[in-house]
Amino acid sequence: MASTSVSRPQILSLYRSILRTARQFTDYNIRQYSRRRAVDGFRQNGGLTDPSSISAAFSDGESQLQVVKRQAVVYSLYAPEVRSVMETYLAGKRS
Amino acid sequence: MASITRASVSMPSLSTSVNQSQRRISGMNSVSFPVSGRSMIPSLRLQRGLQVCCACQAKQETVDKVVAIVKKQLALPADAAVNGESKFAALGADSLDTVEIVMGLEEEFDITVEEESAQSITTVQEAADMIEKLVEK
């Protein structure tokens, strides 16, 4: 944990990493949930001014990033053969 | 000095007029005219529609797509005046919104934006130009 206060670019970089990692999920549900949770979490803590609570929230976010990374691997290992209907719908819409 | 990157080009004349109609370019990757300052010099690019377009500005359809994504992200009404020069901050976006907009652009155009470039985007036009550069690669 950094002893100096967390800077804005660091926070934005963490946000970007979480959103990028969440994109890797093949399952629609967990992918959308991770994205929603990241957006809500960062917005909720956006108004913090106290440096100690900012760095606490930042390290919380970092551990969540590790969770998302691990889960992306686990979900890909146990991906079901029958894809969720939302996957096929979105794939059809894109093509 | 024009450099043609692929051999065997059979084109009768290379006219440098902008807004040409579709040409059949077979077996040719790109013709580049390296001069200092790339305004007013059209470059031939083998793109999806085989169109010849000016390389100085991003394509209008790219800008339109960027505008659509920005409007959706910031929940702006469909008739809000958003053009190439609009700054994200002026439209009511905070830094988190900007990150999400860049994410949305990455997904839409199937590109990957670097960390530093992503932080330097402030207007719609910058985003469109960067997308053009990345799509070209």
Image (spheres, helix red, strand yellow):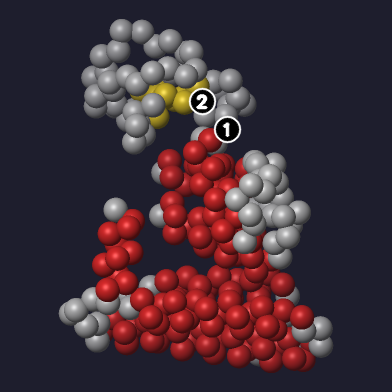
Image quadrant occupied by the N terminus of chain A: bottom right
Q: Which mark is residue B54?
A: 2
Percent across and percent down for residue B51 are 39, 26
x then y, percent, for residue B125: 63, 43
Decide if residue A4 is in sight here. Answer: no
Toward the viewer: A90 or A42?
Answer: A90
In the rendered view, would you say B24 is above or below B48?
A: above
Sort mark 1 into few (<14), some (14-19) or many (20+) by Cα contacts within 10 Å: some
Q: Is residue A30 above or below residue B106?
A: below
Dot 2 amino acid type: Cys
At x 38% / y 73%, what residue is drawn? Answer: A24
User: Amino acid under label 1?
Assistant: Gln
Residue furthest toward the right? A50
Q: Position of residue B68 (x, y in %)?
A: 55, 50
Disc 2 to disc 1: CB gap under 8 Å: yes
Marks 2 and 1, how far apart at CA? 7 Å
Residue B47 is drawn in which quadrant?
top left
Residue B8 shown left or right of residue B5 in the figure: left
- Which secondary structure lies at badge 2? strand
Which residue carries the number 1 mark? B57
Crowd tier of the residue under label 2, counting other residues whose Cα lies within 10 Å: few below 14, some 14–19, many 20 or above: many
Q: Chain of mark 1?
A: B
- Relative depth, front residue between B51 and A83: A83
Residue B49 lies in quadrant = top left
Chain holding disc 2 = B
**Residue B129 in sight:** yes
Q: Nearer the viewer, residue A60 or B4?
A: A60
